[in-house]
């Protein structure tokens, strides 16, 4: 009988940065560093909140996109649902924003269950196609159902109740809320890295037939991954709504937003712990730079970036860098 | 009653153009197994190319069509050769991301080149109509439909009768077997993508007289192309014709009888319904 | 010996083609059954029907006395049917160890236990030195072993091996043959498809011959080798 390796982590299962306890430490260090950001860069708070928030949402997207290999190009629908649910409950019912956020999560999970349940059974690109259709339909409905959503003119949040005495419109507070969400998303990703469920998802991504022959039920596991992804994204959406203070269907349910989330995950490295975070930092930071020097050209650059990444670094920049270092 | 027929006829004519878009997408998917997320942007490229020739050369838009198709075809071949062929064996998401990227780049290039304002063209017959009994037809739409029929007929002939067409069909059935039979599948793929682009560009040219050109409408038409393809069965080129007509008529009826602001949503609803009930498409797949 | 697998009038149709035609098949516990036949005879289709990768068009399948005709593939794996794929399907971006781990998780939900079990399997298959290697970096021989290792991790009662020896050099082939014997000796029933006659005739306790989807002969390797119908089926296709 062989010796089982200690601490549940065989050396062969640590091929990527961040598998096992070392990545947990890395994540904690990162989060601790980020906690000092508001003190270190008080005049770049908007940028900071944007990066952390998008990092959280990109990581949430990645649970389904990178780990399970199901490309959603309609994730903006959950962002929008989260934002609108939060805002509507604040404006109509005077409720505190987290109630709205919870409702948003519920609605997002319901939408995900329905559309995932239908399309995950099918082989082929149906999930990705349906994702665009669902987001687009929601946008059209939100645009036209003015009585509910304020229509194309959008919704604006004049004020929010204080939470534990904190002003929710303060960038500092928003930053820490986003950091909490990011931590949650990272915990989920870290868990996927080491758990049975996480390996199921990866197996589904790599080869669904072989996965089935090993006892994995792809439809069920994909749906669960999707629900988790939708819920986290929805929370991000609610926060995004608070951060923006004013938003409309065109921005919240847009294909561009969905593509951005997917892109962040891919550029940084889909299916890795820190990939989406890195991607978010690069893309948001990068578009800030672009905005100063090349106004209006950021989407063009995104497009070029996707092409370059797919051609030369298909597993994302973080993986490519690591491979280059090993070589 | 007359109004109903009118609405259906309009739907059928528009549906013809949708069919063209769908056929292009279906062909690309059938042969290359790629879902082309830039297809709508190809249509917009067609629109702007038509616009360009119309404004520079003062040639009637419909006469420019062959030129537009050639430009589209060439662009398609080049894109395939340099951006898609390298990732031919990569997993599915690579081609999805790549075509999304191509779409972003192309639509932004159009934005730089032509500006942000929606552009319309005015020809002699933009607003003219003709009558058959109590029914009024838009001249522009009618010409578009006639051309659609001609092109689809031509395409069918090419696919059925020529060696090239046979190669394409063989590659769509089974790429490896086709390769073994001596068919140059690389060339077939480039060609098919070129044809797909050309067809989308054609659809853009046909739609331009009744619509407007703006770089951002690409995704809307990509989505319509998806709807048509799913309705007809992915990879089923003949089914795309039925899918296109169905989409055209559904939109027309929905916009007229339910609500015009939700026009685009009807097709999407039909799409989701088909996915739910008959994912192989209303006309089934041409092969498993 | 108790029966592990039985098919009754098993049938699978593709459009107009009958790929598997009323096949009656049994495998008893501890047997190695060889499945042979000319190309296109329906052997891999038969495997796909038994493992659940394909739905049956007719007939029934019983596994350890329990009907599994409509049971989904992942459930059949849970019940104890493991298989390799003729066109190999490793998980390319996972390491060799992780590939086997996925299978091991079926029997050991806890990560530590699963890793231990996977390590044992790797040892048995001679893959331990490649544990940290990415699966896509393996040679053909390595990949074939990985296919078997992954299926073994399920601790299957019935193992379906699809052409695991083809493409290996004589030394590697001999090693795999030994391995198959050892797997059987541990109590697993094996059904194997193989084109290399020497191997399959030498390993099998019993041979079943398919041609054009039908079972045309069955018996010991000697009986089958001298059966005129079998000889005709092979000659007829050349």
Image (spheres, coloured by chain):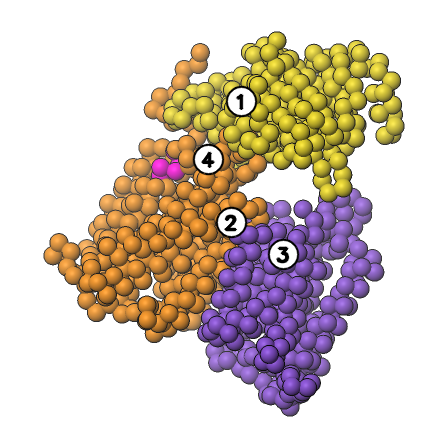
Chain colours: A orange, B purple, C yellow
Mark 4 lies on a secondary structure that is helix
Q: Position of residue B47 (x, y in %)?
A: 60, 76
Look at the image and tell me in which quarter the N terminus of chain B lies. bottom right
> Badge 3 is on which residue?
B282
Q: Which chain carries label 4?
A: A
Q: Position of residue A18 (x, y in %)?
A: 37, 38
Q: Which of marks 2 and 3 is in front?
A: 3
Front residue (pair A276, A94): A94
The Cα–Cα distance between marks 4 and 1, rounded to whole angstroms, is 18 Å
Gap between marks 4 and 3, in whole Å? 34 Å
Farthest residue toward the front? Answer: B1
The residue under the point 76% across, 41% down is C16
From the image, state whether disc 2 or disc 4 is nearer to you. Answer: 2
Q: Mark 4 points at which residue?
A: A200
Foreground mark, 3 or 1, reads 3
Residue, x 33% and y 51% (percent of image)? A106
**Percent of width and height locating residue A277:** 36, 50
Which is nearer the N-term, disc 2 or disc 4? 2
Q: Nearer the viewer, residue A252 or C232?
A: C232
Q: Mark 2 points at which residue?
A: A119
**For residue C156, which quarter of the picture?**
top right
Image quarter of residue A97: bottom left
Q: In this view, does C97 lie to the left or right of A27?
A: right
Q: Mark 1 points at which residue?
A: C80
What is the total number of numbered labels drawn onto the structure image?
4
- Most extreme residue toward the left is A165
Dominant SS type (magenta): helix
């Amino acid at each position: 009988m062989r010796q089982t390796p200690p601490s549940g982590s065989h050396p062969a299962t640590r091929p990527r940065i961040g598998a096992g306890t070392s990545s947990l430490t890395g994540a904690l260090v990162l989060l601790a560093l980020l906690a000092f950001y508001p003190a270190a860069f008080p005049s770049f708070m908007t940028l900071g909140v944007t990066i952390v928030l998008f990092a959280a949402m990109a990581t949430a997207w990645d649970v389904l996109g990178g780990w399970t290999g199901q490309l959603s190009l309609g994730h903006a629908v959950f962002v929008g649902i989260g934002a609108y649910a939060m805002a509507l409950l604040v404006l109509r019912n005077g409720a505190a924003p987290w109630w709205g956020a919870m409702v948003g999560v519920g609605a997002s999970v319901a939408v995900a269950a329905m559309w995932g349940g239908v399309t995950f059974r099918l082989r082929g690109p149906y999930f990705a196609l349906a994702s665009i259709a669902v987001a687009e339909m929601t946008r059209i409905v939100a645009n036209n159902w003015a009585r509910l959503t304020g229509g194309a003119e959008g919704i604006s949040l004049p004020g929010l109740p204080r939470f534990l005495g904190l002003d929710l419109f303060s960038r500092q507070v928003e930053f820490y809320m986003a950091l909490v969400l990011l931590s949650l998303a990272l915990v989920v990703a870290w868990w996927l890295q080491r758990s049975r469920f996480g390996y199921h998802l990866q197996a589904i991504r790599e080869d669904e037939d072989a996965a089935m022959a090993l006892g994995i039920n792809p439809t069920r596991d994909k749906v669960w991954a999707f629900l988790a992804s939708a819920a986290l994204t929805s929370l991000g959406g609610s926060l995004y709504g608070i951060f923006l203070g004013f938003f409309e269907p065109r921005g919240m349910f847009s294909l561009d937003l969905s593509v951005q989330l997917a892109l962040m995950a891919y550029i940084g490295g889909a299916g890795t712990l820190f990939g989406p975070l890195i991607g978010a930092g690069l893309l948001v930071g990068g578009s800030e730079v672009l905005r100063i020097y090349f106004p209006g050209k950021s989407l063009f650059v995104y497009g070029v970036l996707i092409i370059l990444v797919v051609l030369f670094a298909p597993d994302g920049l973080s993986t490519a860098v690591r491979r280059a270092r090993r070589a | 009653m007359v109004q109903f027929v009118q609405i259906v006829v309009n739907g059928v004519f528009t549906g013809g153009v949708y069919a063209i878009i769908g056929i292009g997408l279906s062909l690309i998917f059938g042969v290359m197994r790629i879902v082309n997320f830039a297809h709508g942007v190809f249509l917009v490229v067609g629109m702007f190319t038509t616009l360009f020739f119309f404004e520079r050369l003062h040639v009637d838009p419909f006469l420019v069509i062959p030129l537009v198709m050639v430009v589209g075809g060439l662009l398609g071949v080049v894109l395939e050769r340099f951006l898609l062929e390298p990732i031919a064996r990569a997993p599915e998401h690579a081609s999805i991301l790549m075509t999304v990227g191509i779409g972003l780049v192309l639509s932004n290039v159009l934005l730089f080149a032509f500006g942000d304002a929606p552009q319309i063209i005015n020809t002699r017959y933009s607003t003219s109509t003709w009558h058959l009994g109590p029914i009024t037809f838009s001249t522009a739409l009618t010409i578009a439909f006639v051309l659609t029929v001609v092109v689809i007929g031509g395409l069918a002939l090419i696919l059925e009768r020529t060696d090239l067409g046979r190669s394409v069909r063989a590659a769509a059935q089974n790429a490896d077997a086709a390769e073994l039979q001596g068919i140059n599948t690389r060339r077939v793929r480039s060609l098919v993508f070129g044809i797909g682009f050309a067809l989308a560009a054609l659809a853009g040219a046909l739609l331009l007289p009744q619509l407007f050109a703006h770089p951002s409408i690409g995704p809307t038409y990509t989505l319509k192309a998806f709807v048509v393809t799913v309705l007809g069965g992915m990879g089923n080129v003949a089914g795309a014709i039925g899918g296109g007509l169905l989409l055209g008529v559904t939109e027309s009826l929905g916009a007229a009888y339910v609500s015009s602001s939700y026009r685009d949503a009807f097709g999407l609803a039909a799409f989701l319904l088909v996915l739910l009930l008959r994912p192989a498409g209303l006309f089934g797949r041409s092969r498993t | 010996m108790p029966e592990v697998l039985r098919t009754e009038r098993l049938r699978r149709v593709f459009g107009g083609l009958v790929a598997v035609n009323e096949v009656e098949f049994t495998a008893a516990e501890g047997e190695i059954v060889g499945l042979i036949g000319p190309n296109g005879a329906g052997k891999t289709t038969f495997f796909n029907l038994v493992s659940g990768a394909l739905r049956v068009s007719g007939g029934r399948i019983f596994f350890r006395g329990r009907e599994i005709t409509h049971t989904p593939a992942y459930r059949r794996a849970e019940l104890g049917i493991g298989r390799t794929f003729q066109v190999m399907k490793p998980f390319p971006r996972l390491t060799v160890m992780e590939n086997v781990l996925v299978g091991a998780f079926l029997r050991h939900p806890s990560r530590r236990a699963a890793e231990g079990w996977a390590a044992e399997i790797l040892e048995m298959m001679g893959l331990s030195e490649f544990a940290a290697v990415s699966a896509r970096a393996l040679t053909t021989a390595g990949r074939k072993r990985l296919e078997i290792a992954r299926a073994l991790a399920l601790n299957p009662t019935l193992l379906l091996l699809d052409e695991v020896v083809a493409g290996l050099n004589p030394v590697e082939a001999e090693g795999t043959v030994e391995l198959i014997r050892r797997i059987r000796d541990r109590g697993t029933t094996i059904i194997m498809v193989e084109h290399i006659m020497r191997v399959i005739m030498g390993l099998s306790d019993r041979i079943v011959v398919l041609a054009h989807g039908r079972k045309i002969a069955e018996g010991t390797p000697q009986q089958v080798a001298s059966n005129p119908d079998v000889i005709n089926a092979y000659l007829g296709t050349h």
